[in-house]
Image: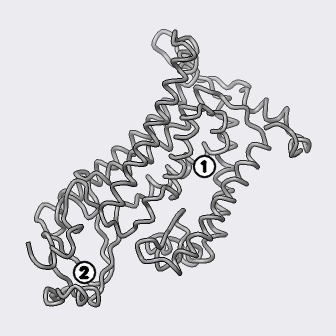
Amino acid sequence: MTAIEEKLPFLKPGFFSWTGTTPNSAPEYHQISKLSNVIFLIGVILVFITCLLLWIFKRQIYASYQNNKLSPLTKNILIRTAGLFTIFFICVRSGLLLSSNFQRMWEAIPFHYCRLMCLVIGFLLLFNRLEYIKYFGFFSIIGGIVALSLPDLKYIYTITKGDLKQMRVENFVQFDPNNHKEFFMAYGQKVWIGDNFFKVNFNNLFFWDFYLIHAFVILSPIVIMILFPMEYRLRTSVISFVIIFTTFLFMYCLNWILDITAPIQWQSNYFYAGLDTVNKIYSKKLGVFTKHPWHFFTYIFFGALFLAISNIFYLYQDNVLFEFSKGKMKVKIIKGENLKYFKEHLSWSEFNIFKNN
């Protein structure tokens, strides 16, 4: 072990390491990286196929759940146990990050968008208050879809020559003439002076953590809404938007405060709404529209747009009936209950704050 490796033990690759399992200078690294992209794509396709199958067979799934012989007490225990396991795994991940000298230590607190949605779903299951999924379900599904479409499987690590001088290991620095950048080697990893982006591949825990958490926030609300149909109306949509807007505003302000005052490990990027110096990847996606502070308005606009689209889809998808007979499937258009209920409760009295939800 070199002197620089003794100073930076958290850069050692491994299954539980956020720097990846295979060193980025290893001959097989690029093959593993390409294979990981294929595996991730297959995983995403499987999630969307599952969503489609849940939609097609939702009436059969609901009927099967209603007709099963499990007692209400057993169902209650199973639901609460699912919530307990969900929260447990969130806590385990937080513990791993806190113990690994993770440079984005703020992620140990599950306030990042999909992590927060997962935590909310966990508590809804734990306390068996699944009727409240109507306020979070659509935003959870939308967040998961966006995350799987634009996966963030790279972890940023920043180090300067000043940091190395403080550790008295600056003599390990080399110069790469091809990239015109300085670097040093540690545990077979090439670490650049400045920003580093360590990609995690399929042979790493954080790869599967990312995939499974986002598959969960997509599929679990769908399953809950199938097994426990919700009464959805305009007031529900407005309350849902107010909740997510208030939460986003809080995270936006929290990011701003931490990004200015906190050490680099705690400069947060919750909801990808941090300062550009922290939100280095997503701040470049749509030019000025995803740069601070304008991304506040961009995210609110797209949040409202996606909520409206998901509302329309939810109300009208119930009008499609899939019938199965003699091994054949027939598609019929009917008058679904969702749209009927929504229209029946479409009035200004819906916004009476003293009215029950």
Label 1: which secondary element: helix
| Residue 128 vs residue 294, the one in the foreground | 128
Q: Could you say which quadrant of the image residue 265 lies in?
A: bottom left
Q: Height in image: 175 above or below 294?
A: below
Position of the N terminus by quadrant? bottom left
Label 2: which secondary element: strand
Position of the C terminus by quadrant? top right
Please tell me which residue is depicted at 50% across the width and 68% down the height of the picture: 269
Q: Amino acid at mark 1?
A: Phe
Query: Where residue 154 appears, x then y in whole percent?
Result: 34, 65
Q: Height in image: 1 above or below 134?
A: below
Q: Is residue 42 visible?
A: yes
Q: Which residue is mark 1?
A: 139
Query: Where residue 167 appears, x then y in whole percent?
Result: 22, 85
Q: Amino acid at mark 2?
A: Trp
> Is 333 displayed left or right of 271 in the figure?
right
Please tell me which residue is depicted at 14% across the width and 69% down the height of the picture: 187
Q: Which residue is mark 2?
A: 192
Q: Is residue 177 visible?
A: no
Q: Height in image: 101 above or below 171?
A: above
Please tell me which residue is depicted at 44% across the width and 61% down the height of the picture: 107
Q: Residues within 10 Å of mark 2 (few under 14, many from 20)?
A: many
> Is 299 displayed left or right of 57 in the figure?
right
Mark-to-mark CA distance, 2 and 1: 38 Å
